[in-house]
Amino acid sequence: MRRTKVAIIGSGNIGTDLMIKIIRTSDTLEMGALAGIDPASDGLARARRLGVAVTSAGLEGLRDLPVYADIEIVFDATSAGAHRAHAARLAADGKRAVDLTPAAVGPYVIPPVNLDQHLASPNVNMVTCGGQATIPIVAAMNRVAPVAYAEIVASVSSKSAGPGTRANIDEFTETTSRAIESVGGARRGKAIIILNPAEPPLIMRDTVYGLVASDDKGAIRASIEEMISTVQQYVPGYRLKQAIQFDTIPHDRPVRLPGGSEFESGTKVSVFLEVEGAAHYLPAYAGNLDIMTAAAMKTAERLAELRARGAIR
């Protein structure tokens, strides 16, 4: 089977991890080029050693490379602001974009929730690492009963957060909050990110709270466990940290929600996750990178498959 040639813009932590993951594990995608803006970056040096075409002139440098004509999919692992500028140029060039920034130019894609719904779009957005880890759990709750409110807290090691991540903290919270609602199905959503400076570095941890309009704890638990198994198919280090917790919200003690409404009865569900990375580039504690790059690669592989079948252009 012919492999689909791809390029990555961004030679930092996320772009480098994605490059190595594609080279080592993908039977569908072929690395064509890596573009960065720092000539001395470790990512560009590694790409050269691996025989991948490189440029330190960003997207314009990528467009000047001979291999660009053969590139079908471009991953953008830069920043939200940069991607907003890149998106129009890539679309004009006929390149499909898989956006790993919080720019949200295209529709949100969380593979186990809505992978095939937006793949005809020229640009798809992978939300955020916290979104990829937690929105599947919100969606799992929502397929049992409506979720009135969902709140997620993503804690990642400071060492795994490069300058692109740090420059996008506001976009992270805004994009993740919106995707909790539009993809996860919660009526209201809130997202918080914590950059943990602990030494030795701690593994990625995620907490998901949901207010679910059901008292069927068995059904909620089964749905969440099924979703975890689905995510583990492409992120083996994704797992429950401890048992799912349930608290009944009685009719006479409603919970006040942001905006002034009340959740009058149902179940508060608390899910505690950890994400261990595959250590393709950074150590295993950087599960935030692994789940983001694994989700992006899975999305691109599905894009390549549908294009090969003629299902999308």
Image (cartoon, rainbow, N blue to C red):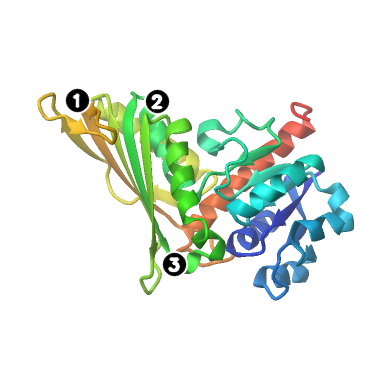
Quarter where residue 252 is shown? top left
Crowding at mark 3 (Cα within 10 Å: few <14, some 14-19, many 20+): some
Q: Residue at x 36, y 42 (%)?
A: 190
- Along the line of sight, which residue is nearer the eye, 192 or 215? 192
Which is more foreground, mark 1 or mark 2? 1
Q: What residue type is labelled 2?
A: Arg
The image position of residue 313, as x and y in percent, is 78, 30
Is 129 positioned to the left or the right of 247 in the image? right
Q: What residue type is labelled 1?
A: Glu
The image position of residue 171, as x and y in percent, is 49, 50
Quick one: label 2 or label 3, which is nearer the N terminus? 2
Q: Mark 3 points at which residue?
A: 158
Q: Which amino acid does label 3 sit on?
A: Ser
Q: Mark 2 points at which residue?
A: 143
Question: Which numbered marker is on residue 70?
Answer: none
Secondary structure found at label 1: loop
Q: Name the residue under label 1.
A: 264
